[in-house]
Image: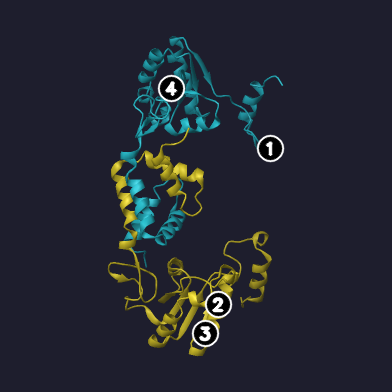
Chain colours: A yellow, B cyan
Amino acid sequence: MQYPPHLIKLIETLKQLPGVGTRSAERFAFHLLSTNKEQLEAMGQIIAQIPEKIHCCPICGVFQDEKGCLFCQDPLRDKENICIVARAKDAFAVEKTGEFKGVYHVLGTLLSPMQGIGPEKLNLQKLIHRIKDNGAKEAVLALDSTLEGDATALYLRKELTLLGLKLSRLAFGMPIGSSFDFVDGGTLAKAFSGRGPF
Amino acid sequence: MQYPPHLIKLIETLKQLPGVGTRSAERFAFHLLSTNKEQLEAMGQIIAQIPEKIHCCPICGVFQDEKGCLFCQDPLRDKENICIVARAKDAFAVEKTGEFKGVYHVLGTLLSPMQGIGPEKLNLQKLIHRIKDNGAKEAVLALDSTLEGDATALYLRKELTLLGLKLSRLAFGMPIGSSFDFVDGGTLAKAFSGRGPF
């Protein structure tokens, strides 16, 4: 005996969300079944309207709303300082730290020879133009500390040093609040070699 | 700096799902942002259409589709055997066991004096009518093994024994695949007192 067809369709749809398996999708679905009509219609509309309501800025690649890019159009932000991220959402993670007052540039992806993602997939030409046009003085590489992030950082170093700007990358080290018991050897080695005066 | 308004709305909407906090909602939202227009429209429609596509059977209270109730309208199911569950989804959990070929009855809730849920909230009068009309011979209480489940089971026993049908409740004991290390004292006591010949 199976669920009604629409319920099956709903569960399959919810399973498309990242990290959601059959059991979670069922739990979500049964919750939605006990939600009132107005809320369901609002939720459905919010999801369906994503493409028309949220766009990426043609300059930096971060999401923008109807009023334009939150970063590129802000006169208070330092256009000579560019933070390079792989995905638009990473810009907001950097933003939350409160450490950065420049502008962003979204690469769109990280290099991954294993998955066939080469340099031509990076949103790089636009970045080079921006650096030249803005007279950018610094670029911060805010990339994952993974193999793909390392490969991308090395590639960008090769491409961007010719432009004569200061290039930096996020520090590696122990995460805040971590005990030695739970820090892996690679992280500890990076933290040790990068130790600072205290 | 904040997300665009529609993205905030999307995240707040996704946070309504059970067990989904801000971080999961953000992860879901960013996944949806990279999903294509057609899929988003389909997803939105599936959610908005829940109230018109999925209804509860007026007899047993389990979800039914356009063709009617999967259980009540099935001539092969034994109408004299009624499994009593708290929520419609519990019927499908029982169904998956493959142990039951009767019909279901959804109470709608469990008694909970703490939350002000008294016997008047149970879908009970309809159950009594069904038992009389169907000449039901057995009722299985498939209720949670919680305080609320116990209170509901005791109340139903008082109400239903007068009707002269065989009343049973799901067995209590060790979950399958469990080790003594992880079984709590209450469960072990129930498993011990309910031990069977081997």
Question: Which residue position holds label 4?
Answer: B75
Host chain of mark 1:
B
Percent x, y of residue A12:
45, 47
Host chain of mark 4:
B
Host chain of mark 2:
A
Q: Is residue A142 rendered to the left or right of residue B122?
A: right
Question: Which residue position holds label 3?
Answer: A159
Instruction: Measure how far apart labels 1 and 3 are at the Cα level.
Output: 58 Å
Question: Which residue position holds label 1?
Answer: B181
Percent x, y of residue A143:
52, 72
Instruction: Measure how far apart labels 1 and 4 are at the Cα level.
Output: 46 Å
Rendered residue at 58%/74% (across/down):
A150
The mark found on residue A153 in the picture is 2
The relative height of residue B8 versus residue B81 in the rendered view (above or below) is below
Q: Local crowd at mark 2 within 10 Å, few (<14), some, or many (≥20)?
A: many
Instruction: Measure how far apart labels 1 and 2 are at the Cα level.
Output: 49 Å
Instruction: Measure how far apart labels 2 and 4 are at the Cα level.
Output: 67 Å
Most extreme residue toward the right is: B198
